[in-house]
Each structure stands twice: as structure tokens, then as C-alpha cells.
Image (cartoon, rainbow, N blue to C red):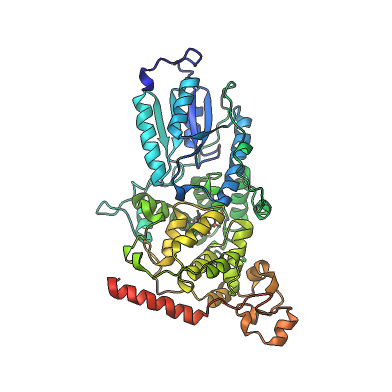
Amino acid sequence: MLANTPLPSNSRDRSDHAPAIVWFRDDLRVADNPALEYAAGQNRPVIPLFIFETNLPEHAQPGGAQKWILHHALKSLDANLKTLGTRLILAEGDALQILQGIVTRQGARSVYWNRRYTQHGIKTDTNIKSTLAGDGLEARSFQATLLHEPTKLLTAAGGPFKVYSPFWRAFERQPAPRPVLPKPIQITGIDEISSPEIDDFALLPSKPDWASGLRETWDATESGAQDCLGDFITNGLHGYAKGRDIPAKKNVSRLSPYLRYGLVSPYQLWHAAVEADAPENDKLKFCKELVWREFSYHLLYHFPSLGWQNFNSSFDDFPWLKDSQDLTAWQKGKTGYPLVDAGMRELWHTGYMHNRVRMVTASFLVKHLMVDWRVGERWFWDTLVDADPASNTASWQWVAGSGADAAPYFRIFNPIIQGKKFDPDGTYIRKWVPELSGLPDKYLHEPWLAPENILREAEIQMGISYPFPIVDHKAARDRALDAYKNLKKEYAI
Ligand SMILES: Cc1cc2nc3c(=O)[nH]c(=O)nc-3n(C[C@H](O)[C@H](O)[C@H](O)COP(=O)(O)OP(=O)(O)OC[C@H]3O[C@@H](n4cnc5c(N)ncnc54)[C@H](O)[C@@H]3O)c2cc1C
């Protein structure tokens, strides 16, 4: 196609100074960005490009909180590129057509990008690579988003891993992740190229503007990511192995929102942790958690339908319930179980939820309320600023028991015991469910057991200022176990 088409007279020549396009996707940073670094080293003008792809499948359309962080990540990237001598170009439409259009108009001869791993991403990129190469262009992709390619780690039989522990052992046998790349010193841009503004894409919510909690919580910039990483290394990593389970503690990194669109890279996290002055067991635990992210991508790469199909198809006949009142109570943090409600409100306010509480809230939806995990996955997809195509789906299937290496369905988190164990003094619950804050610790996890005088002193009217539990824990547990036993009989799982 293009190879045989003479370049228009107003386009640039095909000399060594022909520009290179760097196509940004989920790697919106200037440091540790192999595609950008390579382009910058070519001694030619660079066109940094972000495309709003209009042909994304429905399940891959970004949710509300993701759009919010995408807006800020794009602003951050544009500002950083300007300090290097260029700026971000935005476009909307079919990626191949847009790339071909820029190639034609600007005489670009090369297109570089960092690889992505969703089914749609791989299909699109493979097609673009072969079409551009067929047109005589250089189309080159780099590894930036994962520490090791999903195709590199395979079982002895040559297949994909389905269990985390052997995956981790195989990961350990790989060479150490490559060092972090510096940001380019300078990039030559192109003046005569027009672009819409980031604001034109209306990624921020306006009517209503529900993002005040997100604004309070996140500095969604590349430097904000570095500050968050630095703060974690100094104040959180020491004690991570134990502290990571306590939602009120500051031991988790809260870096997942920055990883979502690549404001920070996993290489930066890995090396910062490995080189930190912190106990070895904390460093190891953190690296192992980071490798859960790799494992999720490994699963998604090898089982692309992970996001919408039960990994274990025996669950296809699970008798999920459709009670919209229960679902709304869960979404709004009004289930009557304080730890569940605290988590759901943290999510709504900040776009983030602590991992321990994600497990408890997800388990509550799937097991206590028997709502299909896909319904919960969609809610998280819309509300999480770190909503990730691999980690979200793999984790939901893990909780539901339908996934790879999943928590067995019969293991049902007790939200009261989880609260007592992981939020013993109620700091987390009191923060997110302030109407319970006056209750003594003894009743905080089971307010319905508090005597009248204690409730009065704490200014709580059960059923009015705080709901009674929407399901009885024991009855809900028995109902879920019965459903599972029937499934087990049928499928011998
Ligand atoms: C139901 C459910 C849904 C989830 N959805 C997402 C999601 O959409 N996006 C997402 O990034 N994570 C998801 N997770 C995994 C995990 O909860 C988050 O990665 C973690 O809470 C992020 O917080 P952090 O950065 O403070 O974690 P840290 O403890 O500081 O861990 C550092 C990094 O390691 C990775 N990591 C840690 N734990 C996990 C894990 N269990 N699985 C995969 N990666 C992990 C993350 O990239 C994280 O940023 C989900 C977990 C559950 C149970």
C-alpha cells in the first residue's frame, strides 16, 4: 500500500531525518520508557502520539475512574515532553488509519511502541506491525510493562502456568529485570503538526463532578508517582510483609494507580525495592506481590477470555442470584457489615481499596450475596483508578473460586472475623464509616449486638443511621455452600 504510494510533495523526505512516531498507550512516562528512549537515540524528530482508539471492545472501554487518571496522566506526559523539547499529539479513531495518516503527512519512516497484552491490543498491534512493515516502514515494539514476557515463562511441558508458586520459581530463574532506563535528555519535535487538546476528550466527570475524592488522594503525574514510590521505600517497605494486611497501616505502596497507565514502571518499583535499605523478607514479599501482577498478565495472555468467562467452566452453571437491592447496598457501602462498607466507601471516595478489603468485599458479593463475579468486576472496573485488565479479572476469578489457582469456593471470608483480625482497633472502619465511630471496639464489627444504651451513647439508631446486616452471615454462608455442593456433585470439582 503505502510503500508503493509516492509521498505527497508537502511531506518530509525519506532521509535519515524522517521523523519517528512513538505511540504511547499504557506507558505514559518519559523515564524508563524503552520506545521513547530508542526513538530519542535515533537523532531524528520524534512525534509522541496517543490515540483514543474508537474500536475497543466493550469490556475494554475505560471506566469512569480510569478516564480520570488517564486525563491527568496525559497532561503529565505532555508537560514532561515539553521540558524535553516536544509535545504530545492526540488523535482519535482507528489506530492503523491514524498512524498511516501521520506517516503520509509527516513522512515518518518508523513507529515505535511498548508492548501490551490484552487480546484486542495484541491483535491490533500485530496487524499494525505487519501492515507498516509491508509498507516498508520500521515498526518496532519494546518490553516495558512487564518484567518478563508472558511467552518466556513456561512450564517444563512448555505450557502456561496456572498456579502462582511454580510461576514465581520460574520467574526467579530468569535473569534479573533489566536496569531502569534514564529519561531522554532532549527530543527534537515537529512544529507544524496540529493536535486537539486533552480537555477536548472530556475525560473528567462534570455533571455531576464526583471526582473530588480522587483529586484529594492522587497526584496523578509522573513526579507524583516518584514521590509515592520514594515515600513507600522510606516509610512503608520496612514492615511490609506483615503490615500489608492491615488496611489502617501505611505499609502498602498505593502505586497500582500509577502503574495502570504507566506513570511508573514495574522496573522502577522492582529496583527501588531490591536496592532499598530494608529487611530482606519485606523486600522479597514486595517483589512477590509485584509478580502477582505478572502472573495475572501471564494468565490473561494465555487465556484471553479471563475477563468474561469462568476459567473453570464448571462454574458456568453456578446459580448466581440477581437481587438488585443487595447489589446497590454493596455498591453504596450499606450492607450492615462494617468492614465491607468501609471498603466500598473507600473505593467510591478515592478510587482505591486496600487489597485485604478488596478480598473481603469481593468475597461478600460473590459468596454472601451470590452475585456473579462479573458484576463485581464491572463495578471495580468503573470505580477503581487502578482498574487493570489482568489483575482485576484474575483477582475476581480468584475470589470467586472459578479462577486459576483460586481460593476454593468453600472458603468463605467471615467479614466480622476479618474486621476483628485486620482492623482490631477499628481505625480503618471509623475513617470510612464515621457514623459508627462512637462505638466501643467491642461492638464495632457487629454493631447490631450492641445494647441500646451503648448505641444511644454512640448516637446510632440501627436501621436508620446504620443498616442492619442485609444477610445473616451464617445463613448466607450455608446458602453459598449448598449451591457449591450441588455444583460439585454435578461436576466432581
Ligand atoms: C477483587 C480484586 C480486584 C482487584 N483489582 C485490581 C485491579 O484492577 N488493578 C490492580 O492493580 N490490582 C487489583 N487487585 C490486586 C491488588 O488488590 C492491588 O494490586 C493492590 O491492592 C494495589 O495496592 P498497592 O499498590 O498498595 O499494593 P502493594 O501491596 O504495594 O503491591 C505493589 C504492587 O504489586 C502488585 N500487586 C499487589 N498485590 C497484587 C495482587 N493480588 N494481584 C496483582 N497484582 C498485585 C500491584 O501492581 C501493586 O501496585 C485486585 C484484587 C482483588 C482481590
- Above-or-below relation of 170 to 359: above
Q: In which quadrant of the rendered view does residue 432 lie?
A: bottom right
- Above-or-below relation of 334 to 111: below
- Above-or-below relation of 342 to 16: below
Residue visible at 71% across and 78% down? 460
Please, which residue is most extreme toward the top here?
9
Viewport quadrant of the N terminus? top left
Using the rendered image of the protein, determine whether residue 423 is visible from the camera's viewpoint: no
Residue visible at 70% across and 72% down? 435
The reply, left or right, for residue 436 in relation to residue 358 is: right
Q: In which quadrant of the rendered view does residue 237 lie?
A: bottom right
The reply, left or right, for residue 350 in relation to residue 414 is: right
Q: Position of residue 470 (x, y in %)?
A: 56, 76
Viewport quadrant of the C terminus? bottom left
Residue visible at 40% across and 15% down? 6
- Above-or-below relation of 188 to 316: above
Of residue 481 and residue 20, the one placed in the foreground of this image is 481
Q: Position of residue 243 (x, y in %)?
A: 56, 65
Of residue 279 and residue 479, the one placed in the foreground of this image is 479
Using the rendered image of the protein, determine whether residue 447 is visible from the camera's viewpoint: yes
Q: In which quadrant of the rendered view does residue 406 lie?
A: bottom left
Q: Position of residue 60 (x, y in %)?
A: 46, 48
Of residue 339 and residue 273, the one placed in the foreground of this image is 339
Please, which residue is most extreme toward the left here?
157
Q: How many marks?
A: 0
